[in-house]
Image: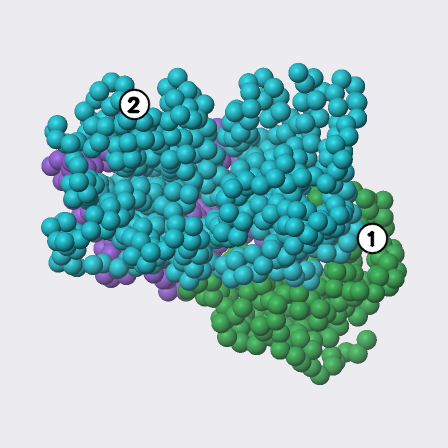
Amino acid sequence: MSSWLDYTINGLIVGNLYALVAVGLALIFGVSRLINFAQGSIYVVGAYIGWVAVVQLRTPLAVTIVLVTVASALVGLIIERFGLRPLQNSARIAPLLATIGISFVLDQIVMLIFSPNPRALPSQLPDIRFQVGGGTIGLLDLLIAGVGISSALLLFVFLRFSKLGWAVRAAAQDRDAAMQMGVDVNRVNQVVFAIAAALGGLSGTLVGMYYNQIDTAMSLQATLKGVVAEVVGGAGNVPGAVAGGLLLGLVESYGVALFGTSYRNLFAFLLLIGVLVLRPNGLFASARQLPPEPLTGTFVAPSRPVRLPLWALLMAFAVFVLLPLFPVSSYVLQTLTNAWLFGMLALSLTLVAGTVGQVSLGHAALLAIGAYTSALLSVNLAFPVSVAIICGGLMSAALGTLLISPSFRLRGHYVSIATLAIGEIVSLVILNWEPVTRGPIGISGIPPLSLFGYDLIGAASIYWFCFVVMVLLALVQVRLLGSHIGRSFRAIRDDDVAARAYGLSLNRYKALAFIFGGFAAGVSGGIAAHLYSYINHETFNTQQSILALTIVILGGLGNVLGAIVGSVALVGLPEVFRIAAEYRILIYGIVLLLLVRFRPQGLLGTI
Amino acid sequence: MNVMSSATPLLQLTGINTFYGQAQVHFDLSVEVPRGHIVCLLGGNASGKSTTMKIILGLVRPRSGEVTFDGASMLGLTTPQIVRRGIASVPEARRLFADMSVRENILMGAFVRSDSAEVARDLERVLTLFPKLGQRLSQRAGSLSGGEQQMVAMARALMSRPRMIVMDEPTMGLSPLYVDRVLDLIRTINKDGVSIFMVEQNASLALEIAHEAYVLQTGRIVLSGPARMLKNDTRVRDAYLGGGGLATG
Amino acid sequence: MAQPAQLLSLRGLTRRFGGLTAVDAIDLDLAAGELVSIIGPNGAGKTTLFNLVTGLDRPDAGEVHLDGHPITGLSPEKLAGKAVARTFQLGRVFGNLSVMDNVLIGAHARLSAVKPDVPLIGPLLELGLALLRPASVTSEEEQLREEVRAILARFGDRLLPRIDQPAYSLSYANRRRVEIARALALKPRLLLLDEPTAGMNPSETEEMQALVAELKAEGLTILLIEHKLDMVMRLSDRIVVMDEGRKIAEGAGEEVRNDPKVIEAYLGHGLSRASADQREPAT
């Protein structure tokens, strides 16, 4: 039975670790107005470097710390120089996508080298604890506190008293004026990334020691927690990030004390959404100020879409319809079926992210809502499968839109952060709401696909079912895009200030986009549930959201045909070349990076 | 003071044509700053004055034309490189680093220098020119009044020991008291040998202290010459307010 | 003499940013059919004033009335529904949309067949109607497209041949014309133009000036911010001069041009005295 003091100490120590990540994010945002989605991946890289140092090289603690710090800083330098600097003059969306791609690639590289199984990371410190009031504090706690305080001091000294530190502060406040004083802004960006990466990587090692466990899945959570702390403290505000980190640690700790460990992350994400909606400037600034613009300029790369002639489309349609009649293996049909399911998700995302400009990173949550609704209706209430799937789509449309609606007032990178957090919240709720979702046990015995009472067994009939549904959704989407609503969507994406001036209600049209997109994604999830016959909270995850995003970028943002082509390419081709599953995600990340750098309008062009 | 200025002007813009996307902002602009002189570029809103500053500082590239400083071409250099050649800037609306102290702001002006002992001495010297700032050194720069901020911006510009200072509307938004102070300071700085290129909307003030002036109207130089001659020329007023011979129809 | 109805009425409109008062207790009346220009040096508060009138920003004090009804602080979307249209400094068109689509957006507030004014399920009805496209919806859309072509025809052959091209591919002057066309598609009662000729060469400026004169002749009420003062003199019924947030002069063209306060605001004192001296006979 731990005392409240123990919870407070625990909260402050963990908060300290969050603060290290958050300070890095704040520095980067301050100087380049960019939310570094790869921060959590650097954190993981740091953790594993620490593991190598402690377990394999058996270096003394001080050397471990130095090694992790320096190696992480190097990683940061490489990311800035090769991943981000070439994008200086690109469309606004490019750096956002680049850090997402980098994050993916880094995570996968670590996973390939070290395998996804969690490992222990011993702390190299004797297990002595000191009595403090009603609680205890251990040597590791003191180490973490020590690292936190000394990092803060070093950073303070650097920013206050060194020339380069002044350059960083000046560039964060007024880039042009800093240049006019002779500051080399490129160098400033490099230094800032190196520091942020060093802090992030060090935090990863320390967290690993604290919980005596590291694994590659930590990255997303680390990014989100870091962003929560940074946003709470005020974007770009370094002392605020420290305060935000400590506050987050305490909120989580007390939340766990009151409600149990499985709710830990839920509090973090709810805090994030609350702050973004009510106090986008953070808790320490006045509410009336305008939030800092997270990058300005054109959002999508302007391009002329590639128009395929009607006969080509009809031919392709015929080929895919007739395919099962030829002697092809069921493996090929299953792969393409998978492509059709991703195609539906990509249609949904290309509408929301491409046509309306809301780059949602939590789209897999819409799959999950659709899947669970359909599964539960057919298992618990014996709904016919087709009806259940449609209900899954409708529920996803309604509930998904409702959940994402807090992000409607946000702009730019904040939309992506909010949707990422909402996706995680949905996943957590599914895990914890056991009476309804059966929690970690999942739902099994989901009836197979059936149409008008006939079960669809056999790869061919399933293939046709999915293909037809996808084509129907695509046709309806094309019709929507050709209407005044499609026009309104794109106007909002291109310039929401001018759009408002001419009577377009942003909330109304963003909601419509998510309703329509939610339906498509929900149907896809529902079909998947009946195909897999078993689902749980891990079936639909962030990796699928990121794959969907890569598909959408490959096809061309907003391009319906592109979404389908992209799905076939990214789902189908790895199968054709028999690429092992672990390498696929790495390839998706690299594809995303290459697209962003060299062809942001994708294969068929943005619309 | 030598009445005839030395042969090559310190700064020369020749035949500058600038575009923002497809909108043309400068049409064959040519301007000179003789060594040790104060030169003003006058003009109303949307005349292209501020863009001229940006061209000199390397923040905007012209589509054609040449910019030379002390005989060497400046086109294609980055802003930090240009600053290191001896040009300092007092930007429009000051653009101080609001969250840094007054002292830090002034010292940022010396960013390109590495001789810290000399920099410290220069700080002392500069503060004798700006006595009021001595009491405010540790105050946050964003909390000062407009006039005080302008003092800081000018002090900052002096710290790099520039050969030329470019100023963008140094008297804008200032009370009459500070306007007088700013003009006095410009004269004092110039007497020390620093050339000044000043962009101004307030023609009468600028013409009080300038040696030469150019009048810019929608991207073209419509008048130029010694300041004392332009002071009494009604065409200056017409260039700003329209009417007279310059408009047609 | 009967007082003409005031279409737009500003009373004591004020906006402060920290210690700076950008707009200082401005009173202004605009009668239906008038063209009033707002001029003034940099930083005078002109665009901020526009933002306050069009709902992009909320005033700290003061009121705005349209046709007698209070509209202070209403959102830009609502004001579009009240037939108030504006253009933006430097122009804000929808880059990836065609010229036709850009101008069609201008008419968005007027859509009725496809946007039934039903609470709660209105958006869903709109979605359904957009997908089903019954005859009423398609004929409304067709009619709007005809109107757009008519509006574009006012610009001669500048925009019509490019009607399907994306706006980002147009020249700067054409993009600004598209912006005006978009504003006209709203069928405004009140049109606010923010520097419509900024960055245009003399011949483009002439064309724009002629268009604005045409619109005025058709009875449109216009509030104009401009720096090209000869254009302002020729078009305006009245000129309002702002400096440092305050109105320092108001009147007909020549009056304002010779007002020493105005000359001082633009040129600074000293020169105004010199000009005055020049007109006095030598003693």
Residue that mark 2 sits on: A376
Q: Amino acid at mark 1?
A: Phe
User: Where in the figure is residue A411, as x and y percent of width and height?
Assistant: 46, 40
Question: Would residue B211 appear left or right of A476 to someone viewing this image?
Answer: right
Chain B: its colour in the image is green
Residue extending farthest to the bottom is B7
Residue at 52% over, 70% down: B62
Chain in cyan, by letter, is A
Q: Nearer the viewer, residue C125 or A318?
A: A318
Chain C: its colour in the image is purple
Q: Amino acid at mark 2?
A: Leu
- The answer to whether residue B201 shows anywhere in this view is no
Q: How is the image coloured?
A: by chain
Question: Which picture quadrant has residue B112?
Answer: bottom right
Question: Would residue A552 appear left or right of C248 to someone viewing this image?
Answer: left
| Secondary structure type for disc 1 | loop
Residue at 58% over, 17% down: A258
Q: Nearer the viewer, residue A562 or A331?
A: A331
Task: Name the chain under label 2.
Answer: A
Residue that mark 1 sits on: B130
Question: Which picture quadrant has residue B39?
Answer: bottom right
